[in-house]
Amino acid sequence: MSTKTSFPTRPLGRSDMSITRIGLGAWAMGGNDWAIGWGPQDDTDSIAAIRLAVDRGINWIDTAAVYGLGHSEEIVGRALAQMSPGERPYVFTKCGLTWSADQRQATPRRNGAPASIRREIEGSLRRLGVERIDLYQMHWPAGDGTPLEAYWQELLDLKQAGKVRAVGLSNHNLAQLQDAEALGHVESLQPPFSAIQRSAAADLIPWCAQNGTGVIVYSPMQSGLLSGGFTSERAQALRQDDWRSRNAEFKAPNLARNLALAEALKPIAERHGATQAAVAIAWTLAWPGVTGAIVGARNAAQVDGVVGAAELELDADDMARIADAIELTGAGFGPLRPEDDSGALPANLFA
C-alpha cells in the first residue's frame, strides 16, 4: 500500500494513517440501478478517475457497500487490482445500510444488527479484493432498534480482530458521538459539510478537534452546486434516476441562493489560479478540526478540476469574503467562518 504523496497530509485522528487533504469519493460510481444514484455512469470512466487521482497523489478512496448496492465497491476493487501493492491508496468504506437484491429501487434499510455487520464486512472485503479495510464506518444511525452501543461495539471488535484498521461514524449527531466515545475511541467522523450545509461546524467539528477524532467531510461542493459548472437549466434537466432531482437545494428558492454563492467564489478562484470547485473544497479544509474532504468525481476530467484543492490554502481575507457572500445570498445555514486568532467567535458567526 502506498502512503507516499507529494501533497500535504494530516493525521487521521489518533489512527496510524496520514491522509491527503482530499480523497476520492465513489458514490456516483455505483451507477443508477438503485434508489439513490446519480444517473448513468460508465465503469471505464470510474476506473480512469480512480487511476488518475492516485497517480496525481490522492492517497485515499471513500466508498460504501450501499453505493450501487455493491457496485461501487466492485469498481474500486477492479481499480485496485490494476495497481501494484505499493501504489494502492487507503480504502475507506461503510456498513449499516442493507438491501434486497430483488428490490433494487427500494430505499435501503438502516440495519445495526451485529450479525448483519459481520456479513456486510465479508461482502465488502470480497468486492474490494482486500484483506483489511483501512477505515470502516457506520453509515447512519441504526433504524431497526439496535442500540448504538451494540453496533459500535461490533465495529470495535472488528478492529480488534484485525478486519479493519480504524473505525468511525458517519451522519451521527453529537450525543451519539459522545455515547460511542464512552465505549471506545471514535477515530473518524464523516459529516456533510460545505459553504451551504455548515451545521457541523457548530458542534461536531469542534468536539472532534478536542477529542482526537479525525473529520472527513462529504459533499464539500454540495453535490456539484458549488462546482462552478452548475446552472438552473442543468438542475431542471436532472434525470429522475439522479437523487438530486428530488433534493430541496436543487429547487427554488434555495437553488438561486446556492448558485449566487457559487458565482461569488469565482473572483477568489481567479486570484488563486484555481477552479471554483477547488475553492469550495478548500473552504471546508480551512476549518480547524477538518482532516480531509471527500471529493466525488465521475471521470478523469473532473479529477483534474478538483485535485488542486489538495494544496490550496485560503487566507483570512478569502474566508471573510466567502462569509460575506454567504450572508448576502442567504445560502444554507450554520456558522459562517472559523474563530479568529484570539479564539473569539465573530459577531456574525451564524447566518
Image (tube, rainbow, N blue to C red):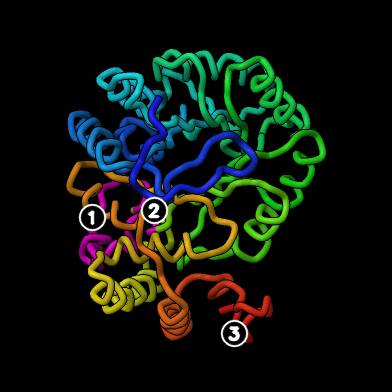
Q: Mark 2 highlights which residue? A: 246
Residue depicted at 62% across the width and 57% down the height: 205
Callout 3: 10 Å neighbours few (<14), some, many (20+)? few
Quarter residue 331 falls in: bottom left
User: Does residue 81 appear anywhere in the picture?
Assistant: yes
Q: Amino acid at mark 2?
A: Arg
Q: Which residue is the site of mark 3?
A: 348
The mark closer to the camera, 3 or 1, is 1
Q: Nearer the viewer, mark 2 or mark 3?
A: 3
Residue placed most toward the observer, 167 or 257: 167
Query: Magenta segment: does it hold 243?
Result: yes
Query: Residues in magenta?
Result: 221-244
Figure check: 268 above or below 77: below
- How packed is label 2: few (under 14 Cα within 10 Å), some, or many (20 or more)? few
- How far across and how far down the image is residue 98, in percent? 53, 25
Question: Is disc 3 placed on a helix, strand or loop?
Answer: loop
Give the residue type that dot 1 points to.
Answer: Gly
**Residue underneath mark 1:** 305
The residue depicted at 45 percent of the width and 47 percent of the height is: 9
188 to the left or right of 92: right
